[in-house]
Image (cartoon, rainbow, N blue to C red):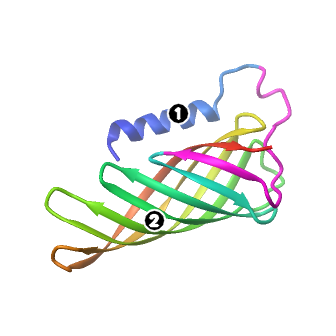
Amino acid sequence: MSIRRFAGSVAIALLALFNPHPGYAAREPDMPQLRPGLTNIDLNYPGVGVRTFVSDKTALEARVQFERSDLAAGIRYYWYPTLSKVDRRFRPYLCLEGDYVVFKKASTKGDGFAAGSFAGIEYALSRQFAVQIDAGPEVFFIRNKDTSATGRELEFILSFGLNYYFK
């Protein structure tokens, strides 16, 4: 991720968290109640996902991430702890992710798998819209198709997204 894209993502997250609209903080939060069957679409950098809640504390999400000639497609498992002292506009979560990865560079191509764990928070903008940001380590197990060489790499991932909840 380039410095400019990272700075832009952080700026958008901060604007969402510290909304300058004077009337927003005074009204009751509108975050939808977690329940089985609740579904949202997640537009994130750099991809898209569809999340469905299987209980009032857990959700599964099918995700596709893409950038230039790299692609990662996989599943995320979310767990939302109950924190009674936290402002209801904020919804913290932990998640595990597994992906199939395909890459193609000028001189090589390959595929593999990735596994990661993330901690994040979602912030309600309205009853149907929320922003989320999460971060964590992800391990990539890749294979070069041209040389059959294999390798693994640990990266720290920062994700930012906009969620739309269906009623």
What amino acid type is highlighted by mark number 2? Pro
Where residue 96 sits: x, y (%)? 57, 68
15 vs 52, left or right, is: left
* Image point (74%, 38%), residue name: 128
- Label 2: how many Cα within 10 Å (few below 14, some 14–19, many 20+): some
Residue 24 picture quarter? top right
Where residue 8 sits: x, y (%)? 44, 34
Where residue 70 sits: x, y (%)? 33, 56
- Identify the residue at the far top of this view: 22
Q: Does residue 37 belong to the magenta stretch?
A: yes
Which range of residues does the magenta coloring cover? 23-44
Q: Quadrant of the C terminus?
A: top right
Q: Nearer the viewer, residue 57 or 47?
A: 47
Circle 1 is placed at which residue position? 12
Image: 42 above or below 156: above
Where residue 6 sits: x, y (%)? 40, 41
Circle 2 is placed at which residue position? 137
Task: Tell whether label 2 touches label 1 (CB within 8 Å).
Answer: no
- Label 1: how many Cα within 10 Å (few below 14, some 14–19, many 20+): some
Cα separation, mark 1 vs mark 2, equals 22 Å
* Image point (25%, 79%), residue name: 150
Residue 153 picture quarter? bottom left
99 vs 92, left or right, is: left
Find numbered disc 1 in the image and state the secondary structure of the residue it sits on: helix
